[in-house]
């Protein structure tokens, strides 16, 4: 039970932290758009509300980096064995790095008891970026307290699955059960969920969230909100504005990290025809995207 409370508390902190970042960090004319407009794209059957802390939690790529900090040999071996086991049973691959790791593993030698139970370890995502499709884990943590007495390092596997976003299982035979034993195995449902959420390629996805236009004589004003809803940083791209199919303006968009947004305000774009009917805004991205349908929008001028 102590666990659940700990994680609930941790996640509330993360959510508050993220909100704080979005509201207070001054991006370049950036507006965070939590809304989910203009998209009929979703990953098929990606609903696994009970198995993960949040739906569709994943790391940006299926290759996930880790670093093990100052652990005694046995725990280090347990952890490496856990990474190896998950690499063999799922489509995920784990690789060690010296810095900027996605999963940080630490160890503690003191035993800890909470609610009459020995705490074996802790694990979970510590940083999440929300997009319209995923809760993207950009950082996770594992703390190994107890060594495993089992042939399979079930404690390390359990904590690794937490770091991948998985919550406890009610099934005592599942390695994600909150009380560990040596006979527990990784549930097929867990493997299936991993397969499903990581089947989406790690591409960017620039999307026009909403846009408006007005015309004043021969001068056009445009406002548009863009967001990268993908799983990768978008490359530099162009934004084209057409007034009745004639190019009225184009501008270069910088690279954008996933989860980030940009508000673009353009004033006094001169157009040759004062009686234009439509304005089309289009993003030409040079990188692969999850969905290109949300890269353009056509507006009718209101006067
Ligand atoms: Zn647990």
Image: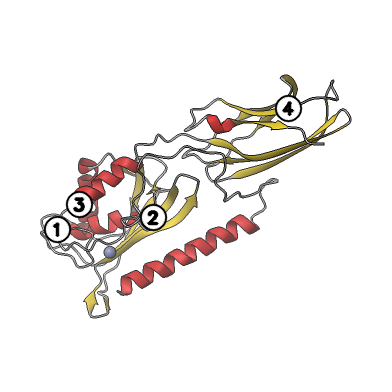
296 vs 185: above or below: above
Other residues around mark 1 within 10 Å, as few (<14) / some (14–19) / many (≥20): some
Other residues around mark 2 within 10 Å, as few (<14) / some (14–19) / many (≥20): many
User: From where the camera sits, is residue 83 visible?
Assistant: no
Residue at numbered disc 4: 278
Mark 4 residue element: strand
Depth check: 20 or 205 in front?
A: 205
Q: Nearer the viewer, mark 1 or mark 2?
A: 1
Is 89 on the left or on the right of 277, as rendered?
left
Looking at the image, is mark 1 or mark 2 earlier in the sequence?
A: 2
Q: CA distance from mark 3 to mark 1?
A: 9 Å
Q: CA distance from mark 4 to mark 1?
A: 62 Å
Residue at numbered disc 3: 187
Image coordinates of residue 258 in percent, x first then y, are: 52, 42
Image-quadrant location for residue 43: top left
Mark 2 residue element: strand
Residue at numbered disc 1: 184
Mark 3 residue element: loop
Image coordinates of residue 203 in percent, x first then y, are: 46, 34
- Residue 140 badge: 2
Going 23% across and 55% down the picture, which residue do you hit?
157
Q: Nearer the viewer, mark 3 or mark 1?
A: 3
275 vs 180: above or below: above
User: From where the camera sits, is residue 210 visible?
Assistant: yes
Looking at the image, is mark 4 or mark 1 earlier in the sequence?
A: 1
Depth check: 50 or 104 in front?
A: 50
């Amino acid at each position: 039970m102590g666990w659940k409370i700990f994680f609930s508390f941790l996640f509330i902190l993360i959510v508050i932290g993220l909100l704080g970042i979005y509201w207070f960090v001054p991006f370049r004319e950036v507006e965070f758009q939590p809304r989910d407009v203009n998209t009929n794209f979703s990953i098929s059957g990606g609903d696994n509300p009970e198995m993960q802390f949040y739906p569709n939690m994943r790391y940006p790529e299926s290759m996930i980096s880790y670093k093990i900090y100052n652990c005694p040999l046995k725990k280090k071996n347990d952890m490496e064995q856990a990474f190896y086991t998950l690499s063999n049973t799922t489509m995920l691959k784990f690789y060690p790095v010296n810095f900027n790791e996605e999963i940080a593993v630490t160890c503690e030698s003191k035993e800890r008891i909470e609610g009459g139970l020995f705490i074996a370890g802790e694990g979970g995502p510590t940083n999440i970026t929300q997009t319209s499709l995923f809760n993207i884990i950009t950082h996770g943590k594992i703390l190994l307290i107890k060594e495993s007495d089992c042939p399979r390092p079930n404690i390390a596997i359990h904590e690794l699955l937490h770091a991948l976003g998985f919550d406890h299982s009610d099934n005592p035979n599942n390695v994600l059960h909150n009380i560990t034993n040596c006979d527990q195995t990784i549930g097929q449902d867990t493997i299936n969920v991993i397969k499903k959420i990581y089947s989406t390629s790690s591409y960017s996805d620039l999307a026009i969230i909403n846009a408006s236009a007005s015309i004043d004589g021969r001068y056009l004003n445009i406002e548009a909100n863009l967001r990268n809803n993908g799983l990768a940083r978008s490359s530099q791209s162009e934004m084209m504005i057409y007034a009745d199919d004639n190019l009225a303006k184009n501008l270069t968009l910088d690279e954008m990290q996933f989860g980030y947004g940009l508000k673009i305000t353009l004033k006094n774009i001169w157009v040759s025809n004062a009686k234009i009917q439509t304005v089309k805004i289009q993003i030409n991205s040079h990188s692969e995207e999850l969905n290109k349908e949300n890269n353009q929008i056509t507006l009718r001028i209101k006067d």
